[in-house]
Amino acid sequence: MKKLLTMALAALCLGAHAQQNPILPEMHADPEVLADGGRYYIYSTTDGAPGWGGYYFTCYSSKDLRQWRYEGIILDLKKDTQWAKGNAWAPAIEKKNGKYYFYYSGDQGERKAIGVAVSDSPTGPFRDFGRPIVDKRPKGQKNGQQIDVDVFTDDDGQSYLYWGNGYMAGAKLNDDMTSIDTTTIVRMTPRGGTLQDYAYREAPYVFKRNGIYYFLWSVDDTGSPNYHVAYGTAKSPLGPIEVAKEPVILQQRPDQKIYGTAHNSVLRIPGKDKWYIVYHRINPAYLDKKDGPGFHREVCIDPMEFEKDGRIKPVTPTN
């Protein structure tokens, strides 16, 4: 499962061998991670293209989380899909039944949609399913985009799909992992909040700890230094979500030239209650709006801890 990532603690502790942020070369955003076969894999939005115009996804792998090897382009929307024209954004990956299912956002032309591609290997080649798995808003939702997909598989083996910019939706995935049970679609958008605390924008991410379902999301615009992560909890994988009393868990540190810290995934050391958050931030050389801060981002990782009652402690983003 993508939620579990065996981590070498030496790569993250202080000292000569400490992990340095950012962890990937060049510019990437919306990171997703997978542990498989003794290696670790990161999938992300390929950044740096004006107007978020990237059209392909890459993969990097590592044995120690410090030295990352470029594995190449794993899915080119222009060449490998029949429906997506570009805007290759915010992927998710899940290994199940010996197959790797790669979910992603793409531009269908008139609107955004979410697709899925399948492979026998974490580095591909991935074969696109041929049509979107989600291509319209949930019933009753009048605005927002079908982007920013996440997948969570519960202890009983049931998998769930989550998505949405401007709204948050969730549904059960069918056993084929390439379609959803449309009868289970539910709007899950956390209500209320402001841009200074927990007003939902995008990027849902779900994990489970000690029987509690945690829902993380991003607040404000990805090009804003204020872009940050808030969270809530639920008693079931499809909510309802109760916003945490202190919901903001990751935000900018201007004193360290760290800005726009959000759109995350979460990593756990198998067998231990050790957790980390993987996220992107704005490259500080591109803070001015004319320089495109929203598509000049870089991937980072920092520890994430919990209080005894299960509350997530605020994360300190570092260099």
Image (cartoon, grey):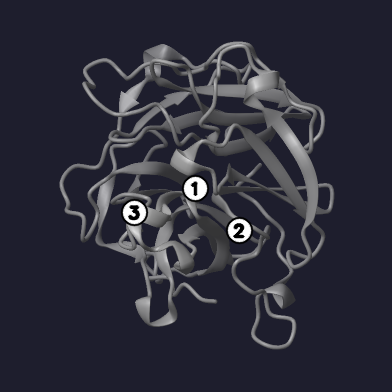
Q: CA distance from mark 2 to mark 3?
A: 17 Å
Residue at position x 65%, y 15% in the image: 129
**Label number found at residue 16:** none
Q: CA distance from mark 1 to mark 2?
A: 10 Å
Kindly check if marks 1 and 2 are in contact, taking CB atoms under 8 A apart as contact: yes
Q: Which residue is nearer to you in this view: 200 or 309?
A: 200
Give how far across and how far down residue 95 sits, in percent.
70, 34
Q: Earlier in the sequence, mark 1 or mark 2?
A: 1
Give how far across and how far down residue 248 sits, in percent.
30, 63
Quarter placement of the C terminus = bottom right
Residue at position x 50%, y 54% in the image: 296
Q: Which residue is mark 1?
A: 207
Give how far across and how far down residue 93 sits, in percent.
63, 37
- Density class for disc 2 (Cα within 10 Å; few <14, some 14-19, many ≥20) is many
Above or below for 182 versus 151: above
Q: Which residue is mark 2?
A: 268
Above or below for 214 versus 132: below
